[in-house]
Image: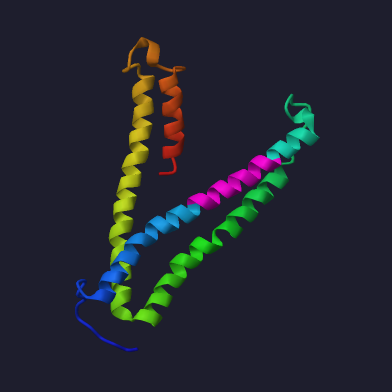
Amino acid sequence: NGQKFDQVDILQPFEFAGLLVGAMLPYWFSAMTMKSGGMAALDMVKEVRRQFETNPGILNGDSDPDYERCIAISTDASLREMLAPGALVMLTPLVVGFLFGPKCLAGVLAGSLVSGVQMAISSSNTGGAWDNAKKYIEAGMLGDDKGKGSDEHHAAVIGDTVGDPL
């Protein structure tokens, strides 16, 4: 609507509502991408099981799996499953700006920036902590019976695997 403004007062209702919506966006986007990754992984697991059942020679190395089918599943899932998260980040500013105005949009952008930075720092530290925990256990710092091969080590390896993308 061509409004010009020098400041945004986050104590005003539209700006504050925008701030809350913006603060939610990085978490919503992350949840959508994690769900999509899980659904894509499930598709891959189903395909691997199907190949094991139809071609038992894969398990003992007598025949090769159908790699092209697995690549196709991964590619199709990545394109299909990222439509909704992509639409969320592309359409939210447009919808908010046109429906609620530039001050509400400023709140959305400020909220998503602050929330996204906090999430990035937290994720980075979490991933590093899980990796360091595994290294700590592998160095034998928990005692002789709790190093590599122990239940603690298995749990740390899982934690490190989860933490790698972070």
State the quadrant of the N terminus. bottom left
Measured as percent of width and height from the top left, residue 163 is found at 41, 38
Location of residue 54 (image quadrant): top right
Location of residue 105 (image quadrant): bottom left
Looking at the image, the residue that sits furthest to the front is 13
Q: Is residue 17 above or below residue 4?
A: above
Left or right, residue 16 beside residue 35: left
The boundaries of the magenta stretch are 34-47
Q: Tell me, yes or no, whether the highlighted magenta stretch contains residue 105.
A: no
Residue for point 50% across, 67% down = 87
Left or right, residue 144 beside residue 32: left
Measured as percent of width and height from the top left, residue 43 is found at 65, 46
Residue for point 42% across, 33% down = 159
Residue for point 32% across, 68% down = 109
Q: Is residue 84 above or below residue 7?
A: above
Q: Tell me, yes or no, whether the highlighted magenta stretch contains residue 46.
A: yes
Looking at the image, the residue that sits furthest to the bottom is 2
Left or right, residue 138 beside residue 73: left
**In front here: 141 or 8?**
8
Measured as percent of width and height from the top left, residue 38 is found at 55, 46
Looking at the image, the residue that sits furthest to the top is 144
Provide the major secondary structure of the magenta segment: helix
Left or right, residue 50 beside residue 45: right
Measured as percent of width and height from the top left, residue 129 is found at 33, 35
Specify whether residue 36 is in view. yes
Residue for point 30% across, 65% down = 20
